[in-house]
Every structure is written in C-alpha cells, then in structure tokens.
Image (spheres, rainbow, N blue to C red):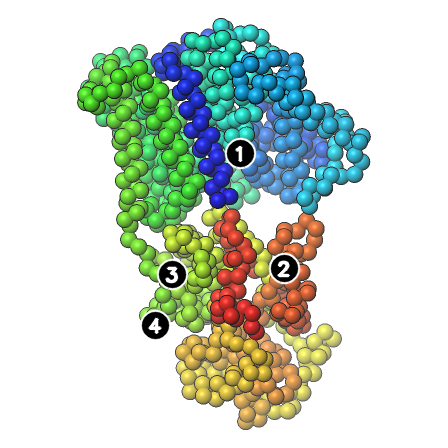
Amino acid sequence: MRRLAGPLLSVGMLCLALWALRALASEVSYREVARYVHSLENHDIILAVLLTAASYGVMTLYDWFGLASIGKRLPRAQVTLISFISYAFSNALGMALLISGSIRYRFYIQAGLSTAEVAKVVLYCTLSFWLGLFALTGVTLLLVPVPPFIPLAGLRIPAGIVLTLIPLLWLGGSRLIRKPLRVWRWGVSLPSPLVAARQVLVGAIDWGLAAWVLYLLMPNEVDTGFGHFLAIFVLAQIAGLVSHVPGGLGVFEAVMLAGFGATGNQGLEAPILGALAAYRLIYYFLPLCAATVVVLLREARGLRRKSLLAPWFTELLPPFFAGLTLVSGAVLLFSGATSALPGRMEVLRHVLPLPVLEASHFLASMVGMCLLILARGLQRRLDAAYVLTLVLLLLGAVLSLLKGIDYEEATLLSLLALALAPAHQLFYRRASLFSATFSMGWIIAILAVLGCATWLVMFSYKHVEYSNNLWWEFSFYHGGAPRALRALVGATAVGLLFALANLIRPVRPTPHLPTETELDRALPLIKHYSSAQAHLALMADKTLLFDDEGKAFVMYDVEGRSWVAMGDPIGNDEDARRELVWSFRDLAERAGGWPLFYQVRPEDLDLYLETGMNLIKIGEEARVELGGFNLDGKSKKVLRNTVNKLKRDGMRMEIVPADAVAALIPRLKPISDAWMRDKGVREKGFSLGTFDPRYLARTPMALVWQNDQLVAFANLFLTDSKDEASIDLMRHVPDGTAGIMDFMFIELMQWAKGEGFRWFNLGMAPLSGLQNRRNAPLWSRLGAMLFGRGERFYNFRGLHKYKDKFDPEWEPRYLAVPAGIALPLVLANVASLISGGLSGMVRR
C-alpha cells in the first residue's frame, strides 16, 4: 500500500484537477483556447523565451553556489550543462528531488565528486529551491491580498507569516544554533548568513522570472498588477508541487483559473487557458526538448570516445527513451482528441481524399496507444519493442501530416526516431513483448493518459450535441467530433486487446526438479563456467531455467514469495546470461513473487543494476590464488608442521574420478553419519551439498587415508577451464587425528596447483566485511553486529578466522533484490531454503 499510495495520490489529484477545470471552464471551447494561442504577439513570445532562458540561467547558480559550499570547483560549462539538464527534466516531469538528484549524481560522479559531496550539492539546491519559493510566497501573501473566494483565503496572513519565518530562521539559524542539527542519522550544519541569503535570493529570483514568463502571456484584461498575479501564481505552483502530479499538470491550471475567475474575470477563461498552454510549451516543453538533444549528443560523443560515460548511457537511456515514447504516445492521443486548424484543413481538402484523412486520424490515435504500451517494453530492453517503436514513430509522423499537417508532432516523433535509431545495442532482449510485466505504476500511467485524452475530447467538443448519427459523420469541416470519438474508441480497443492478450497468455510451468536430460544439458555449461559454484546445479534440488538457445541457465528454488536464484546465470554467452536475469525476473513477477539472486559476484553486478534491482552485501568469499601458494614463511609454520606430522603418521590423499564414486558410497555413509551426530547438525541444502549418493556420484572425490583406514572425504568442483577448483561436502571421522581438515585443504591446493588451476575457492564467510559505522545502511550495521556477537547462532567469526589462515583474497558477495520488498522476510526465506525448512532455522 505504501508503494501504491504515491501513484494513487497523483492520479486522484489529477482527476480532481480535471474535474475542476471542466467546472471552471464550462463555457469554454477548444477553438477559443487555440485562437488565443495563435493570436499571441511575436514579440511577447520572443521575450517569454528570453526570460525562460534567463530563469534557467539563474538555476545554474544553485549548482555553482552548492559546489562552492563544499569547496569544489568545476568548469563553468560543465556545471551549467548539468544544472540545465537536471532542471529541464525535473520541471517537466515532476519528482524534482528524485529526477534532478539522479541526473546530478550521474554527472557529478563522473566529474570526480564523491557520493557524500553529490548529496550535499543536491541538498543545497533543493533547500534553495524551496527557501526561495517560501520567501517569495510569504512576502507576497503579506503584501498582496488574494481573492476572497479562493479556499483558505482567510488564512493569508498566518500562512504568509509562517512561510516568511522559514527563510528568516534559516538566515539567522547559524547565529542562534551553533551545533549541527540532527536529522535522523545525519548532521546538518546551518550555513552562515551570507550563504543562506544567497540561497534565498537565488531561489526568489528564479521563481520571479518563472512568474514573469506567464505574466507576459496572460491577456491584458486580467492585468491587475504583477503583485496580484504573483500571489495567485505562487499558490498555484505550491499546489502543483504538493500534488506530485508530473509537472503539476492540471493542478496548476485549475488553481490559476480559480484564482483569476474569483476576481471578476468571468468570460476570460479561454484566454487564461491559452496563456497557460503557451506557458507550458515555452517554459517546460522547449527546455525539455533542448535538454534531450544535449544529452543525446553528449552521450553519443562519449560512446565514440569510449569514455567513462558508457555505463551511464547504457543504464539510463533505455528508461529515458521509454519516458519519451510514453510522452509521444500521449501527444498523439491528445492530438486525436482535438480538431485540426481550419487553415490546414482547407489545404488538405484540396490535396487529400476524405477517406485518407479519416483513416489517418483513426490510426494515429491507435499508434499513440501502441506507443504507450511499447514504452514499457523499451524500459525492459526488448528488441521487439525497439523495432516496433521505430516503425510506429515514423508511421505516427506520417499520419500526423496526413490528418492535419501537424508538422510539430511529426517533427517531435521524427527526432525521437532519429535519436532511438543508433541505440539498437541497448535493446538486446529477444523476449516476447507479451512477456513484459506491467507494474501498477505503469498501468496507472497508461490509464491516466487515456483518461486525460477522454477528458480532452469532452472538453473540446462539449458544444456538440451527442447523437448516434455522430459516429458515422464524415466531413472536412464538421467531422472533428466524430473523428475524435472514433479515434478514442480505437485507442481504447487497442489497450483492451493487449490487456486481454496478456490475460489469456499461456501459464508458465510451475517450478520442478530437473530431469536427468536437463542435468546432462547443463553439465557442459557447468564445466566451462569460470566459477566452480555452478556445480551446485548437480544437486538436482533446484529448478533449471535455460535461455531459448540453451547457452546459459539459472538454478533457483521458491520459498514463500521469494524466488531465489543460486548465484549468477551460468554460461559464457553474455547476451544469454543478461537475458536470463530479465526472464527470471519476469517469471517471478508474473507469479506474484520476488526475484532474488543469492551470492552474486562483483563482476556481474551490472546484470542486476540495469534491471533496477538493489544490491545488498551478505558476506565475503575466500579464494586462494594458487600460483603464489606455498607453505614457506613464518606465517605458515603451523600449517607446515601439521601437514608434515600427519604425513609421518601415514596420512595421504587420493583423488577418485566421478565414475568410481558410486562404489565408495557404502564406506562414506558411516563417516558422514558419525560426523553429523558429533556436530549435532542436520543436512542443509540449496547453497550447500548434502549426502545424496546420486549427487556425489556426479563429481570427483578427494579421499584421505590414514594407513589403510578411510578417515575423511570431500567432493570436488573442478572446472574444465582450470579457472577454479573447490570442495562442497566435507566430512571426517569424529575421533580422527587433529588437523585432518587442514591436511585436506593443503593437499587439495597443492594438487590443484599442480593440475594448473588458477584459484581454489574456500567458500563464503557470511556477514564478513559488513561495516558497523554510523552512516552505514541499517542492514550493514545489523549484519556487522551479528558477525561480531552472533556466535550463539552461527560460528561467523570462527569460520572467517579459519579460512583466513590460508591467506585468501576476500571477494564480496551480494544479494540482488527488487526495490521496495520486505527485506527481513526475504532473508528469512533464503535462510529457510539453506536450512531445509523453518525447523532448520532454529536448529543446527
């Protein structure tokens, strides 16, 4: 419910705003609004564009002063570029802190700033943004009366005092409070009066320029002074920001219309709406288009130079293109809901048959709905979505020209197609478009766009009397309403058909244990994979998910809602491995589960980051580099003496091939049973092997003999590539000679070194390497505490200390999880899988 609360609030506010706009502009027609936009003087438009440029120029001071506050200097052009891109996107799309913060993080990290420094700059800019708005709003409310019919107008003075006090307290805070303020786990030092004044002043100028742009575009009849206009403007902006609707769309317009309508400006609703529409185009849309071009040129240049920009390009551009495709689909739907300009229709009447016009209008709206659906496929990096989007963008551009010479739409769609064309490598997934899952947020976004298009049809043609004959009316001059209705029904039908196709798609098979045929299919991939951990698939206790061509697979099990994959995808084909991460995630989400990847390696983190998953460190794995391994030196004296003593006592090691293991099972079983009784433990699973004769017979075995008595054994994981050797199940007689385990490890490492293996894997030490520092994440601090004080539950420190005496290299291991899931429950599910059930979690 917490995840749905934000989108549902935004949709609710949008619906309320559309209802208010319809009520406030009940006598307004779409033609009147369009007529006012086209009647704007050229010099007013040019001045508005210049003021918009000045406003975005002032916004760069946020970043300049933010960097100065942390003692950092970057090239002027670089800071200006970063600031412009971040504000162009955040102003148009909303969610300012998330969007502008993410963009700044990407660019400033590349510029050499640390994460903490980027966070300080983002905090500085955000505070300046709000402090300027509060200061301007508070002073305006105190000096200028607002219309008495606006809700809460009677609270003007108290609200103005409160809003003015906030920046005043910020200005004098450093004099009153010497110590840093504690905000949860962070300390915030109040700035000096000079720095604070700079923040407030820049923010106020920024908002003042934004208001001036709209003031120029407003009709002269409502001009009662800039102060009065400013009072309504800042209240509307606050309402739009609080609503969380992208760009405050609808909410800002409703408050502005209510504010000016309450001051005796009835009958001027159409010019006011026209001014607001022009303001959206000039102040939001033009900077967004410019920023889009700048980003594409910058990142394309970075790719040609093979610079460090490629990871940012790869990770962020697919969702970026998805967002632009969503916007393009909305533009086509909104265009289909309104009538074309009469002058352009007059031109079409002489060069185009009426059936072509009607078909183009109908198909354009259907293309718009298809683009809304394909946007999700682009976010999921689907190759089919990429190809279809390119085709439909070009088709939409042609249809826009045929249905009304809408060259503005055609240009937008064509530019997006040109930007998308060279990015084919980013959309590598061969999965079906119908396999893409649609989250609640995406469903709400598509429905919101369709709802806005429906509202726009009702608003544009509310003067037309509805009748059944209206559906079948075809005309150049009087066919706007019928065309809009037919186009809306066509777009809705496309959405319903796609939803129906998703509902009736074949049900995916439920997880099942692998057959011998599947194990034989997986064995070559296991043997040629770089990590010996892949041999855990031979336990046959986990489901194997192969890619379509059988070049890679994922092994996984299900516990509760958690679909847990053991390790990274196994295989040497990177495209197949990357596709499997997406396929596994889609499979789990369609079943209502949480996709997890347990014990993933650092070199494969990009596979999970690009799918939007979070990474949580769960421990470290010990790997010994065999090229430099020996028993020389003082640090290895104890191990050297132990091995030499046991050899003198008649201890030796033997390596048995896999085909000879089955005959040894009767001799190995008593040793395993005795070891488990002595330790008081039960068999684990999932990430650890069990004493299963079928499993043990699939791998070679290391045997330790003392004279003629078998005293220990361990099954071996050996890769054909000689990259890594490891052991899984290791058991020894309880009353055997001390040091058997040390002897086995040393002998195995020396044997593996002689066989040409590069690494010997000693396995993972859970919770090792987690930090218990004040600023560390909560999970890291909790894990570090368990590592240090949880010996009652598990021998965390002892296990790490034992493996550390072999001088391994410790590599971090992670758990990849989707954002927003219940982490404690997920960890409990993983522990249950390893322990063999809930009862195993409370028993050793």
Q: CA distance from mark 3 to mark 2?
A: 31 Å
First of labels 2, 1 by sequence position: 1
Identity of the amino acid at label 1? Met
Q: Can see residue 479? A: yes
State yes or no: discs 4 and 1 in contact (Cβ < 8 Å).
no
Furthest-bottom residue in this view: 708
The residue pinned by badge 4 equals 516
Identity of the amino acid at label 2? Gly
The answer to which quarter of the image holds residue 632 is bottom right
The residue pinned by badge 3 equals 545
Q: Looking at the picture, tell me which residue is in the foreground, 14 or 208.
A: 14
- The residue at the point 43 percent across, 13 percent down is 269
The residue pinned by badge 2 equals 783
Work out whether 315 lies above or below 715. Answer: above
Secondary element type, mark 4: helix
Q: CA distance from mark 2 to mark 1?
A: 33 Å
Q: CA distance from mark 3 to mark 1?
A: 38 Å
Q: Disc 3 vs disc 2: which is toward the camera?
A: 2
Q: CA distance from mark 3 to mark 4?
A: 14 Å
Identity of the amino acid at label 3? Leu
The residue pinned by badge 1 equals 95
Identity of the amino acid at label 4? Glu
First of labels 4, 2 by sequence position: 4
Question: How far across and how far down the image is residue 412, in percent?
Answer: 39, 26
Work out whether 134 lies above or below 96. Answer: above
- The residue at the point 48 percent across, 13 percent down is 261
Q: CA distance from mark 4 to mark 2?
A: 39 Å
Q: Mark 3: give few (<14), some (14-19) or many (20+) Cα within 10 Å.
A: many
Secondary element type, mark 2: helix
